[in-house]
Image (cartoon, rainbow, N blue to C red):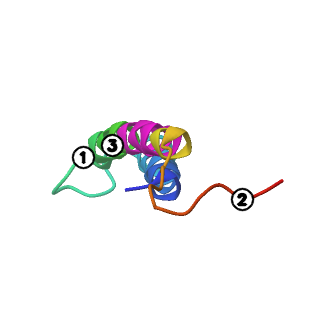
Amino acid sequence: MGIGSGIFLIVVGAILAFAIGPDTWEVVNLNVVGYICIAAGVLALILGLVQTRQRQHHRVERYDDRPPPAV
């Protein structure tokens, strides 16, 4: 999951948690599902940011037999 999917989960979770009444659907409490989506979205957002930060600081060094370029 990336940053975009984390934001999407937060938005969908906020809609389910705050905009829909708790007794809309009798099978499942949609407010609880919304809070779970918000928590999963925050977790996905944090993990996406950590992965992006690690990718930015990763340095690839190439070793070959060519001499350095003449200046």
Quick check: 38 above or below 27? above
Q: Bin the neighbour count of mark 3 within 10 Å (Cα to Cα): few under 14, some 14-19, many 20 and up.
A: some
Q: Which mark is residue 40?
A: 3
For mark 1, give the secondary structure.
loop
Picture coordinates of residue 14 (x, y %)?
Answer: 49, 44
Q: Position of residue 20 (x, y in %)?
A: 45, 50
The magenta stretch spans which residues?
A: 41-53
* Disc 3, SS: helix
Q: CA distance from mark 2 to mark 1?
A: 66 Å
Closer to the camera in the image, 5 or 57: 57
Above or below, 49 relative to 1: above
Q: Nearer the viewer, mark 2 or mark 1?
A: 2
Comparing 37 with 52, the one in front is: 52
Is 21 situated left or right of 3 in this image?
left
The disc at residue 29 is 1
- Mark 1 Cα-neighbour bin, 10 Å: few <14, some 14–19, many ≥20: some
Q: Position of residue 62 (x, y in %)?
A: 47, 56
Q: In the rendered structure, does residue 47 fall within the stretch colored magenta?
A: yes
Name the residue at 48% across, 47% down.
55
Mark 2 element type: loop
Compare residues 27 and 55 and report the one nearer the observer: 55
Dot 2, how many residues are within 10 Å of its Cα: few (below 14), some (14-19), or many (20+)? few
Circle 2 residue: 69
Looking at numbered disc 1 in the image, what kind of residue is underneath it? Asn
Residue for point 35% across, 36% down: 39
